[in-house]
Image (cartoon, helix red, strand yellow):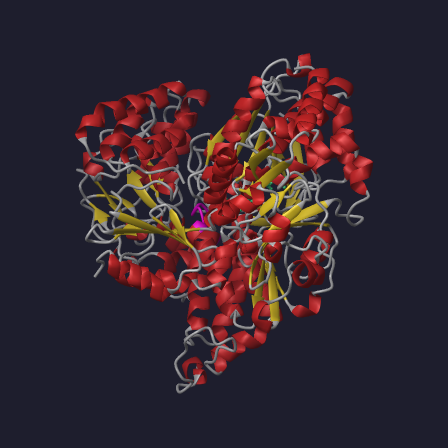
Amino acid sequence: MSVRTLEIDGKAVTGVAGQSIFSVAWDNGIHIPRLCHVGGVSDVGACRLCMVEVEGQRKLVAACMTPVEEGMVIRTNTEQLLAHRRLIVELLFAERNHICAVCVVNGACELQDLAASLGIDHVRLRYRFPTLSVDTSHERFGLDHNRCVLCSRCIRVCDEVEGAHTWDFSGRGVNSLLISDLGEAWGESESCTSCGKCVQVCPTGALFAKGKMVSEMRKDRRFLKYIVTAREKHEWVR
Amino acid sequence: MTFEDLLEQQAKEIARQQGLRERIYCCTAAGCVSSGADAIKKAIDEEIKARGVGAEVECCGTGCMGLCSKGPLVRTQSDGTIYAAVTPEDAGALVAGQGANLLADRKLDPQADFFIKQEKIVLANSGTVDPERLSDYIAAGGYQALARAVMELTPQQVIEEVKRSGLRGRGGAGYSTGLKWELVAKQPVDTKYVVCNADEGDPGAFMDRSILEGDPHRVLEGMAIAGYAVGAQQGYIYVRGEYGLAIQRLQAAIKQAERERLLGSRIFEDNFQFRIDLRIGAGAFVCGEETALIASIEGKRGQPRQRPPYPPESGLWGKPTLLNNVETFGNIAPIVAKGGDWFATIGTPTSKGTKVFALAGKIENTGLIEVPMGTSLRTIVFEIGGGIPEGRAFKAAQTGGPSGGCIPPQFLDIPVDYESLHKIGSIMGSGGLIVMDDTSCMVDVARFFMDFCMDESCGKCIPCRAGTVQMHDILQRITKGEANENDVALLEQLAKLLRETSLCGLGQTAPNPVMSTLNYFSGEYEAHIRDHRCPAGHCVLPAAASSNREVQA
Amino acid sequence: MPVVTKPDVPAVKDNRERFLERAMSRHHYSGDALIEVLHTAQELYGFLTPALLKTIARKLRLPPSRVLGVATFYHFFSLEPKGEHSMIVCTGTACYVAGAQGLMRVLEHRCAKAGSTSPDGKMSVQAARCIGSCGLAPAVIYDGKILPRLTPDQLNAELDRIGVK
Ligand SMILES: Cc1cc2nc3c(=O)[nH]c(=O)nc-3n(C[C@H](O)[C@H](O)[C@H](O)COP(=O)(O)O)c2cc1C
Ligand code: SF4
Ligand code: FES
C-alpha cells in the first residue's frame, strides 16, 4: 500500500492510495460533516455536505468520493463552505417536517447535530409542509417519511450488507419517496428480514424502533463498519 | 460489401435518378408532418400512379428542409425549387411539372438570407436524401468515409484526423472530440462501447431529432468510424421515447446497413465488426447527462454519479465508453472524407465547423438552420430568422435551454461560439435558440426554466433537489408580487450553492437562467418586487397597495 | 410516441402475456433490460399494474423495489389506467413563449393536473417537453393528433364538445 502525504486544514497528514479525503481527515481527527456517508457501505456523494476546497482545483470536491493524492492541500472549513453547509441543512429542514420536540431520536439525531454545530437557529427558507405518511405496519419498526432526508443509507445497507434490497426510492426529485418492495406497507414486505440494520444507520428519526418514547432512542451506527470488516480482520468480538 | 461495390451502387443510383424527369421531395420531418405532410406525399404518390408516370417521376420523403413555420415544404429536384404551404390539391401540378407556373406564389426565393447565409455540413443531406432508403445515402457518397477509415487509415490516423479538425462536442460542454476518442482508444481493455446521446431534452430544441429523422445513416456511419477508431464493437443509440419517427427510421436504417454489411461483422471485408442497438428513453431529461444515460442503459434509475471516473475510463458496465452527441457523430463522416484540415477552415479559431440551431419563439422563420461557428446572433435572428414578427422589439435570445442564459440586445453582435457565449453568462448548449420579444417577462422565463429543472431533478443530491424547489418558490412569488429584496439575496445564495455543490450538470447549471436575467434584466425584477408591475404585461400582480418595506421591517 | 393500447378484451390476454414473455426472453431475462421490458409491458397493457411489475421483477430476477423505483422515475411509465381521451400539452420553450401555460390552466381547471387522469376517466393530461413542432406553437397532441396553434377558447370548445364538465 503506497502512502500519500497531504495537508488538511494546515495539518500534515498521511493516507493510503485510494483512501478518501473524508476518511483520511477522520483518521486525523478532522470531522468533515456528512449525512449520506456511513462507514461500511459504498458512498454515493449525495448530500454534498462534505464538499471541501482543494488548492489548484476550480471546483469543490466531495470528500467522501475523492481519493487523496500526493501533495493535496485541502481546506474543510472556509467561510464559504460553512455557508454552503448551513444552506444545505436549512434546505432539509424546509423540505419535510422535522419537528424535533416530538421525535424519538431527539438528542441523538445527525441532522439536529449538524444544525447545532453549524449554528443554525432559524431557517430563512419557506417551509413546504408536505403531507407525508407514517408507516407503522412493521411489528418492530416504523418509518416516518416526514423525517426522511433521502440519504439512501438504508437502501445501501439493506442491499449491500443484508442482501435483501427491500428499500429503494420511487419517484424522482422532490417527489422521491422511500419504498419497500412494490410500495406495500413495510409490515407486508416479503423481502424484509427484520434485521434492523436500516434503522440503525438512519441518521434521523425516519426509521425508528417501536416502543420508544420521545427522545429515548439511541442508534449505533458504528456496528456496521465493524460487522462488514469482521471476517476480513478476524475481529468478531468488539 | 467491398469499396468497389459501394462505388458501383453509387454510380448506379445516380444514373437512375438522373434518368428521371422529376424527383419530388416531401419534407416528412416532424414539423411538416404535424402540418399535414403525410397527406401530401400520399396525394403525389396517387397522382403519379393515376397518370402512369411511375417511370419518370418519383416522390420521396426527406428530412427537415429548415423552414418549419412555412411547412409543409416540397422540393422539386429538376430545378431545386422549394414550395411552401403545399396542400394535397397541388399534387397534380407538381407531378405534371407545372409547379413553377401554378405554385409560383408559394415558391421560396433561393436567394433569400435564410438559404444563402447558411452553410450545411451536418444537414447537407437533409432535404435531398430519402432517409428511408440506403441507396439515396450511398448516392450522396454515404459510407465512403467509413470505407476510407477502415481500409486506408489506422485507428490512430482516424483520431488524428478528428483532432486536426478541431471538432468539439455538440452536446453542450464542447469538449474536444478527438481528445475524447484518444482517451477511449488508449484504454487497454478489449470490450469498449460507443454511445450516441440522442436524448435531446432541452425544451425548444429539435436539432438532433431532425438529424436522426432526416439522415439516420450519417449518424450510424459516424458511430461506426468511432467504433473503429477507439476499438469498440458495440454501439448504442439512446433515443428519447418521444421521438417515434426517429426511432422508426433508425431501426430501419440499422437493418438496411446490416443487410448490406455496412454494420455487423467483417465490414468492408476487414476484420472490423460493429453493431448498433437502440435504447429508448422513458421521459427523463437528466438522462442526457452521460453517467445518468449510462445508468439508464443499464436498466436503472437515471441518476448521475460522481465523475471521475469519466466514461472514457469507466462507463457502460464499467467498460471504457465513448459518448458523443448526435450532431457530433454527424460531423464525423465529412471530416474523415474531406480531411480535418478542411473542417478546420470553417468557424473561429477555437470553435471549428458549423452549428445547427433550432430557431423558435418570437421569430419569423422558425425552423432548423446550420451556420458556421462565429456567425453573429444578429445574422441568425434578423437575417436568417427574418426578425421578430408583428414589428415587435427583440428582447432576448435564450440559448442552452435550462442550463443557458438570456442574451440581451446589446450582445446581438457577438459571434456565436463556445467562448463568447460563456463570457456573457450563457452557453452554446445543444442548439436551441429561442427568441423573445417585449411581451416576454424575463422573471417568468427564469421561473419557467426553474420549474423545468425542479421537475427534472433526479433527487439524488440535496442542493439540486431541494434548492430548485426553493428557487422556484421565490421566483414564483416574485411574479406574483409577493416577494421582497431579501428573497432576491436568498435567490443569489441558493444559486451559488447549486452551482458549486450540485453533483451533476443539471443542478450546477440550473441557476444560469436566473443569474443571467438578474444580470441583464434586473429592472424587471425590481418592477415586480417594488412596484408590483410586470413591464412585459405578462404577470398578473395585485396592485402595489401594501408596501413591501413593511414586510421587511 | 409508442401507441398505447387500452387494457381491455380478455380474449387477447394470453397473447399479451406471450408477447411480454418474448420481449423478456429476447433480452435473455437480463435485469439490464428492465426499461425495455417496461416499455413493452406498457405498450401491451396500457399501464403498469402491481401484478405486472411483480411478474417482471420475478422473471428478471430483480428486487421489486428496484422495479417500482425505475417505473416511477421515468415519466413515460404510467401506473394508472389512461382516460378515454388524452391531451399532451407541449410545454417546451417555444410553446411556453406562445402561451402553453394558458392551455394547461384550462386543462388543470376542467380535467386534471399534468400526469393524471380526470376523476371521471374522460381525459388524461400530460405535459411533454418539446414535441418538435415549435413552428406550430402552442401545440397539443390530442389522441395522437397534433392540434396546432391552439387557443384556450378552441380548447374549451373541444372539451365542451366531448362532454367534459
Ligand atoms: C442535465 C444534462 C442534460 C444533458 N442533455 C444532453 C442531451 O440531451 N444531449 C446531449 O448530446 N448531451 C447532453 N448533455 C451532455 C452530455 O452529458 C455529454 O456531455 C455529451 O453528450 C457528450 O457528447 P459531446 O462530447 O459530443 O458533446 C447533458 C448534460 C447534462 C448535465
Ligand atoms: S444535480 Fe440534480 S439531477 Fe444532478 S445528481 Fe443532483 S439532484 Fe440529480
Ligand atoms: S458525505 Fe459526501 S456527499 Fe454526503
Chief secondary structure of the magenta portion? loop
Q: Which residues are magenta?
A: B456-463
Q: Is residue B430 magenta?
A: no
Placement of the C terminus of chain B among the 4 image quadrants? bottom left
Do we see residue B186 in this rendering? no
Q: In this rendering, is residue A189 above or below B522? A: above
Q: Nearer the viewer, residue B358 or A75?
A: B358
Q: Is residue B462 magenta?
A: yes
* Quarter of the view holding residue B365: bottom right
Placement of the N terminus of chain B among the 4 image quadrants? top right
Do we see residue B479 in this rendering? yes
Q: Nearer the viewer, residue C66 or C27?
A: C27
The answer to whether C53 appears left or right of B290 in the picture is: left
Q: In this rendering, is residue B400 above or below A167? A: below
Report x, y in % for residue B10.
69, 24
Q: Residue furthest front?
A: B51
Q: Residue at x 39, y 25 (%)?
A: C31
Q: Nearer the viewer, residue A23 or B189?
A: B189
Q: Nearer the viewer, residue A85 or B159?
A: B159
The answer to whether C119 appears left or right of B536 in the picture is: left
The answer to whether B49 appears left or right of C155 in the picture is: right
Q: In this rendering, is residue B255 above or below A88? A: above
Report x, y in % for residue A70.
69, 37
Report x, y in % for residue A98.
32, 57
